[in-house]
Image (tube, helix red, strand yellow):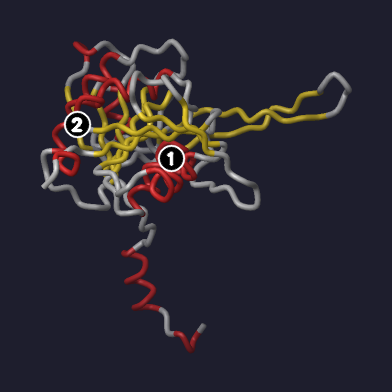
Amino acid sequence: MSEEKTIPIILITNDDGITAPGIRNLVEAVRELGQVVVVAPDKPQSGMGHAITIGVPLRLNKVEDMFDGVETWQTSGTPVDCVKLAVDKILHRKPDICLSGINHGANHSINVIYSGTMSAAMEASIESIPSIGFSLLDYRFEADFTAAKFYVHKIVESLLKTKMDKHLLLNVNFPAVPTEEIKGIKICKQAYAKYDEDFDERLDPHGKKYYWLTGEFVNFDKGDDTDVWALQNNYVSVVPVQFDLTNYALKKQLEKNWKINDI
């Protein structure tokens, strides 16, 4: 077996764009664990969810000297497009793991539905590539990623030493506190929480109406086994996620109660 095949290939992407500090910190956290290849959007793509580009040409360009010798590409597409292009056009084989992030801002609870960070990781999981989405609860450009980098390294190093399920998909969030204040890693469930949203109506300089989405985050889940609780109590939250959205309990109930000829 050649040395090349024994070195893990680590695909890195994000939704904040290739110039975001979060992706640079992610590269730095894992670059010594394998052969890192970066394929990221050329501009911020937050909140894109699992969107893909259809009907518009995608651009894919190699970027030199972005991450000190790490092969780096930027695309005009979405985070999901990045994963698709990486698998089909850049990598000579499927990567051993796909890492998405580190996102600037929370991706706990309901955020996983809207997150471009998690959708990129989910796309990799669909492609039978073990994957993790990483997020830091700090939206600031100058956020401190020190603790996040420490735990990213520990998590990825541990997983690369094991035989991972090909559909492994983890949603990992970091509290915005110094490393010494983090109590450890907590395996959680996704909290039942949502945004109480409102569209703020305003007028542009021409007197025409426009709307700005605002809202307040409301947590309905008061359990101590959720990602929201873990983060509020200075734990790194780890939520196992899957792309199969089937409600199996309801499926059994419908199979029992519904008769096709009665509907």
Tag 1: amino acid = Ile
**Is 106 placed left or right of 51 in the picture?**
left
Residue 263 vertical position relative to residue 3 in the rendered view, above or below: below
Viewer-closest of 154 and 219: 154
- Residue drawn at (33%, 37%), measured in percent from left and top? 11
Residue beneath disc 2: 155
Q: Position of residue 216 (x, y in %)?
A: 52, 28
Residue 162, located in which quarter of the rendered image? Answer: top left
Q: Secondary structure at mark 2?
A: helix
Q: Position of residue 99 (x, y in %)?
A: 32, 35
Viewer-closest of 50 and 114: 50
- First reached walking from the N terminus: tag 1 or tag 2: 1
**Is 166 placed left or right of 206 in the picture?**
left
- Residue drawn at (17%, 24%), measured in percent from left and top? 184
Tag 2: amino acid = Ile
Instruction: Residue 243: give its label.
Output: none
Disc 1 packing (10 Å; few <14; some 14–19; many ≥20): some
Residue beneath disc 1: 110
Disc 2 packing (10 Å; few <14; some 14–19; many ≥20): some
